[in-house]
Each structure stands twice: as C-alpha cells, then as structure tokens.
Image: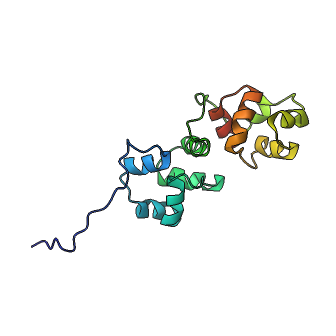
Amino acid sequence: MLDLSTFRPKTYYTPPVTSDNPLRRRRGELRLSAEEAAERLGISPESLHTWEYRKEVPAPRRIEAIARAYELPVEKVVLMRCELALGRKPTGMLSPGIHAYSLADWTRGEIYRALAARCGVGHATLSGWINGRCMPEADNLERFAREIGRSEADVAVACY
C-alpha cells in the first residue's frame, strides 16, 4: 500500500509558457526543478534563483554550462543572457555565420578612440569587446550595435 503521508510530488515552479524570464522558461520546458537545474549547472539553487528572478545576469563564463544543462546552442544562451540584461529581447534576428571575427570585420577602418567615444566607453573597453575578452553590458549594447550598424543579437553573439 502506498503511504501518501510521506509522498511529495516534484514542484515545477513555472509553467514553460508563462514566464518572462528565458532561463526559467527553459527550465519549465525541460520540466526540471530548481534543485535539478542547479545541479546540472554546478551552482547552488540560490544562485539559480537570482538568475531566474532578474536579480543577477549570469557571467559570460557560465554560458557554456547553461548551454549544456539546458540542451541549447551557445548562441541561443548568449541571446537569453542578453534578454535578461536588457529586460527585453535583443533587436534584430541573428545573422548566419556570426563568429568571433565578425566584430573586427564590422569595425575595420574605424578609429577605435572615435568609436569608443561615440559608444560612451573607453578605448580599452571597446577593444575588449572586439577581441572577445568581455561582453558589453545592457546599457552599452544598444549604442554599440547602433554605431556599427548591426543588430543587438549579432553584436551579443559576436562579442561572446
């Protein structure tokens, strides 16, 4: 006989369709509890909670782990991270063939100091974006994309 006094069903905090957070939405699609997802990601459930409730954006170094845990391509996870940072989906569609060298091609011929000034950042920061050492934060992404004439989605993926 089944003892129902100790039976506790798994809780899925968020149905996949209703969440506005892309990480929480994907976890719901995979039918993972927060504990299961955190274990797959190699982080604490508290850290996952901060990502899912928009208190913190995952660091770029976590993108590959998220892609493996949530069974997604890296480009999709970069766009999810971008959506979390911006509070909305990035503008534009992802162009095919985006890779690390795209930003260098798009900015070729530009004087970095002038482009950096138009973007409102230092030239060392701009160099970091172009050379893949760091990613622009939400407030800089829109300006940088506009200045080089590309979509936010393209810039986010190329910076990764």
Q: Can residue 100 be seen in this view?
A: no
Q: In which quarter of the image is the C terminus?
A: top right
Residue occupying the point 82% across, 46% down: 125
Question: Looking at the picture, does residue 97 appear above or below residue 7?
Answer: above
Indicate the colouring scheme: rainbow
Relative to 133, residue 107 above or below: above
Where does the image place residue 136, in percent across and percent down from the top left? Answer: 72, 44
Q: Quadrant of residue 139?
A: top right
Q: Quadrant of the N terminus?
A: bottom left
Report whether 18 appears left or right of 93: left
**Residue drawn 61% across the image and 41% down it:** 86
Q: Where is residue 131 in the image (x, y as percent from the top left)?
A: 79, 44
In the rendered image, the vertical position of residue 114 relative to residue 135, given as above or below: above
* Number of numbered callouts drawn: 0
Residue drawn at x 70%, y 38% is 141
Visible residue check, residue 34:
yes
Question: Residue at image x 69%, y 34%?
Answer: 142
Q: Where is residue 100 in the image (x, y as percent from the top left)?
A: 71, 40
Q: Residue farthest to the top? A: 149
Q: Position of residue 56 (x, y in %)?
A: 59, 55
In front of the other: 11 or 43: 11
